[in-house]
Amino acid sequence: MAFEIIKKQDKQVFDAISGEMKRQQEGMELIASENYVSKAVLEALGSVFTNKYSEGYPGKRYYGGQQYTDVIESLAIERAKKLFGAEHVNVQPHSGAPANMIAYNAILKPGDTVLGMDLSHGGHLTHGHPLTLSAQIYNFIGYKTGKDGLIDYKELEKMAIKHKPKLILAGFSAYTRQVDYKKFAAIAKKVGAISMFDIAHIAGLIAGKAIENPVPFFDIVTTTTHKTLRGPRGGMIMCKAEFAKAIDKSAFPGFQGGPHMNNIAAKAIAFGEALKPAFKVYAKQVIKNAKILEKELTKRGYKIMFGGTDYHMVLIDVMGSKEVTGKEAERALDEAGITVNKNMIPDDPRSPMDPSGIRVGVQAITSRGMKEKEIKMIVEWIDAIITAHNDKKTLAEIKKDVTKFCKRFPIYPKV
Ligand SMILES: *Cc1c(COP(=O)(O)O)cnc(C)c1O
């Protein structure tokens, strides 16, 4: 990964790539939605498949010259089917948000009602936030977590009976507890709704068999491929056979044009990696690391939302625990070389731009080989940084230690 040609041809872009490489290498990445792909995935992304138009699906394309695109897309589909036990897979969605739009468009009509989780309770923007296009087209109603921090299934059932949604959505970007798949499916069945699970965050944990696979329980499952699944930036839709045609038509020509075949090649490679035994070890270690993170933070007086985590991340109420806002905590951590994101907590009294919480994930640092000992060190730093959030000198000192520490865990050995 020397980027020799770019270096000769375009110094400005080269400098930015080199800068980003150094930033990723020397920084502590704790954003819960990021990861480090393999060199093989990077190579596929930079392959000649980026030159090719291949509108349609394997064996049914609009243009000629598809001998190899068909091979690649079929491989990606077959591997995804094996990983998740899905009846049908579409690997063309450009990312997670379009995957959700494609799924909605496949099964809903404008004005149809959808039950999705409230954003501040851990849901995602694409599940009905008023600023999204989907919220202008469909009638989203948000369900919430109960007092115990878990999804309130009784209330969800009541809401489903009352609002008669066409679709009930599970899937979250900050909720951290195992979902009761059977209950979700049963509620959807009771009111005649389609059930959908957006597993964007936890796809890798499922693929690595560290948590139970929801695919058999839901009509439709959407995901990103670049979070815990550790593939290229992209989306994917899995569904029961009865929805296959509608999903495929909705992806193309309904919503997208030509698939990004270089990306699909990289998805095939990432799925191949996820099928190997080493990925199971990775997924288990991610959850182990998250549990240690939860325990160490709790020991130091940090309040973890939803009563803890079953996944790769925790949502911390820094305002409620230490009287530091999420924005302030994010800034101070950033200054000390640790990247997290500020995040709303359930029914947050503060604003989205300056909420009460931060979200911290361990899936990226686990890819770098960090384990229990390292997580303990990181929590010590987080606590020291939040405590000294206004003290520039302390933050600068910690940054030096963090940088030195990170250099011991190369993201791409020998680059
Ligand atoms: C990240 C995420 C998405 C959006 O994915 P993009 O690739 O950023 O478009 C959708 N749903 C959930 C639950 C997510 O976490």
Image (spheres, rainbow, N blue to C red):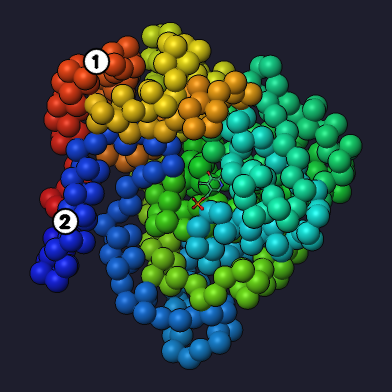
The disc, 2 or 1, on the residue closer to the chain's N-terminal end is 2
Quarter assignment of residue 341: top left
Amino acid at the residue labelled 1? Asp
Considering the numbered disc 2 on the image, is that residue within a helix, a strand or a loop? helix
Q: Which residue is mark 1?
A: 391
Q: Is residue 128 above or below residue 1?
A: above
Instruction: Identify the disc placed on residue 10.
Output: none
Location of residue 201 in the rendering, given as x and y in whole percent from the top left corner: 51, 42
- Seen from the viewer's position, the closer of residues 279 and 408 is 408
Task: Count neighbours of disc 1 (C-alpha within 10 A) and say few if under 14, some if 14 to 19, many if 20 or more.
Answer: few
* Type of the residue with mark 2: Asp
Apparent side of residue 150 relative to residue 75 in the rendered image (left or right): right
- Count of marks overlaid on the render: 2
Residue 292, image x and y in percent? 39, 20
Which x, y percent locates residue 344? 54, 28
Q: Which labelled disc corresponds to residue 15?
A: 2
Does residue 118 appear in this view?
yes
Relative to 377, residue 21 above or below: below
Q: Which residue appears at 47% of the width and 66% of the height?
A: 76
Crowding around mark 2 (Cα neighbors within 10 Å: few <14, some 14 to 19, many 20+) is few
* Residue in view at x 81 percent, y 55 percent: 111
Label 1 SS: loop
Q: Is residue 355 above or below residue 137?
A: above
**Residue 361 in sight in this render:** no
Tell me which corner region of the image, top left, top right, bottom left or bottom right, holds residue 245: bottom right
- The answer to which of 199 and 302 lies nearer the viewer is 302
Q: Is residue 369 left or right of residue 194?
A: left
Query: Which image quadrant is residue 141 in?
Result: top right
